[in-house]
Amino acid sequence: MSSNAITAQTPPDEQPSPKRRRLEEPTPSPTADRPRTLAPAMYTPRHYDPFSCVSNFSIIESTLREGEQFANAFFDIDTKIRIAKELDAFGVEYIELTSPATSEQARKDCEAICKLGLKAKIVTYIRCHMDDARIAVDTGVQGIDVVVGTSSYLREFSFWKDLKSVVAQATEVIEFIKSKGVEVRFSSEDSFRSDLVDLLSLYKAVDRIGVARVGISDTVGCATPHQVYDLVQTLRRVLACDIECHFHNDTGCGIANAFAALEAGATHIDTSVLGIGERNGITPLGGFCARMYVADRDYVTRKYDLTKLRDIENVVAEAVQIQVPFNNFVTGYCAFTHKARVGREAQARAAIILNNPVAYEILRPEDFGVARYVSVSHRLSGCNAVRSRIAQLALNLTPEETRNVVQQIKTLADAKPIRIEQVDAILRRFHRARLPASDAHPSGKPSGGPSH
C-alpha cells in the first residue's frame, strides 16, 4: 500500500450509485518500502463508504465574498484581481464574489473578474429575488448561489411566509438562471437551527427543479462534527444533486465540520484565505488543505499547488492589515519549528526530528514550499540541533568544539534571550579558529530561522 495516499479502496463487488463519486485508488509510491513514511493504516477508513467524498471534493473559495465581511477588509478592484489570480494559480475550482446587487462597484468588480479568463469558475451570491438574479446573470458569472434564511431567527425578518410560497419563488428564480445557462446552487441560511422537515422539503423541491447543488450553512458556528455528519448524510440519502457546505468558525469547528461533511457525502466546501470573514470567519483554506492532505496526500497535491499557499496568505494578510498568526496552519512561523525538551530526551528528540521527521510531523514542509527548522538559540539546545545548524551554514567543527558551543549557548540563554544571529556568530568564531590565518574568513550562508 502507498505510504502517501491514505484513501479507501472500492471493493470490486461494490459499484457506487451514478450519483455517488467513486473514490480514487491510491497511487503506488516509489518510496513505499522506506521506513520514513506515514503509516496509512492509521488513517484509512476501516470500511468502504460509498458516500464519502474525502478523496473527491471541490473548493469554493470565498475570500472575495465572505472575506469582504471581515472587519478590516476593503478590496479595491486591483486587489481583487490579484487575489483572484493567486487563487486560480493555486487551483481552486470556484471563486465566489460579493453579490453584484449590493452596489454599483460590486457589479463592476464582478464583471471585471469574469473577463479575466481564469480556469476557476466565477460564482456569486444573491437573495432569492428576481431583481438580484437579473443583475447577477448580466455580469457574466458562471454560477449563482440563491440564498434563503430558514431558521426561525431569520424567517422573522425575511420574505418567508410559508413553504409553498418559498418554493414558488425559488422555482421562478432558479428556472430563470438556468435558462441563461448559468449553474445554480440553492442554499439555506442558518441551516443547523432550522426545522429539519422544512429543510428536507425545500431541498427536495429545488433538487427536482434541477439545481447543480444545495448548500447548508452553519451561519453562527454552532454545529458540531457529529451534527454535520448526521445532516449531510440525511441529505445525501434523499438528494441527487451535489451538496455544498459553509461553516463559520465561532466555536472552532470550521475545519473539523468540513471534514465531517465530506465523510458524510458533501462534495463542495467553502473556504477563505486565513479564514477571514464575518466575526471569526469560516473554514480557512490552508487549514482545510492540511486536513485533507493527511486524508489523501496524493489527491490533494495533484489538484492544488500547495507551494503557493504562503504567497496567497501574505497577499491577503497585507490587504486586510494583519499578520499571519505564529501558529497558522502550515505557514505560521512555528508550524515546522522544533524546540527540544531537556537532558538526554532533548538529544534524542533532535536526532529523531533531523533523521526521521515523520516521527514528529504529519505534514511534509517541502510539499508546501516551506522549511523545517530546529531551534538552537535557547537553553534547551543540544548537540544534535547545533550540528544541524553547523551543516546548514557549511561550517566545520569537531565534536568537542560542538559541545563547547552548546555550553556557551546554554550559558548565554540562562542569562537572557538570545537570537539565532548570536548562535551563528559563535559557530563561525569556532570555525575560523580552526582555519589557517590566510583562510580565516566568515563562512556559511546566514539564515534567520524558519522560512515561513
Image: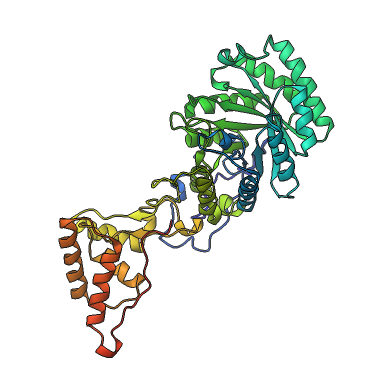
In depth, the one of 111 and 234 nearer the eye is: 111
In depth, the one of 324 and 90 nearer the eye is: 324
Q: Quadrant of residue 382?
A: bottom left
Q: Position of residue 403 (x, y in %)?
A: 18, 70
In depth, the one of 267 and 148 nearer the eye is: 148
Left or right: residue 250 compared with residue 390: right
* Residue 87 in sight here: yes
Is the residue 212 above or below the residue 452 in the image? above
Q: Position of residue 123 (x, y in %)?
A: 70, 37
Q: Quadrant of residue 133?
A: top right
Left or right: residue 253 compared with residue 100: left
The colouring scheme, among rainbow, by chain, secondary structure or one colour, is: rainbow
Left or right: residue 328 compared with residue 49: left
Disc count in the image?
A: 0
In depth, the one of 134 and 385 nearer the eye is: 134
* Residue 18 in sight here: no
Q: Position of residue 427 (x, y in %)?
A: 26, 72
Q: Residue furthest top?
A: 161
Q: Position of residue 434 (x, y in %)?
A: 23, 83
Taking the spot 71% from the left edge, 15% from the top edge, the residue there is 166
Q: Which part of the image, by quadrant, shows the C terminus?
A: bottom left
Taking the spot 29% from the left edge, 55% from the top edge, the residue there is 339
Taking the spot 50% from the left edge, 34% from the top edge, the residue there is 71
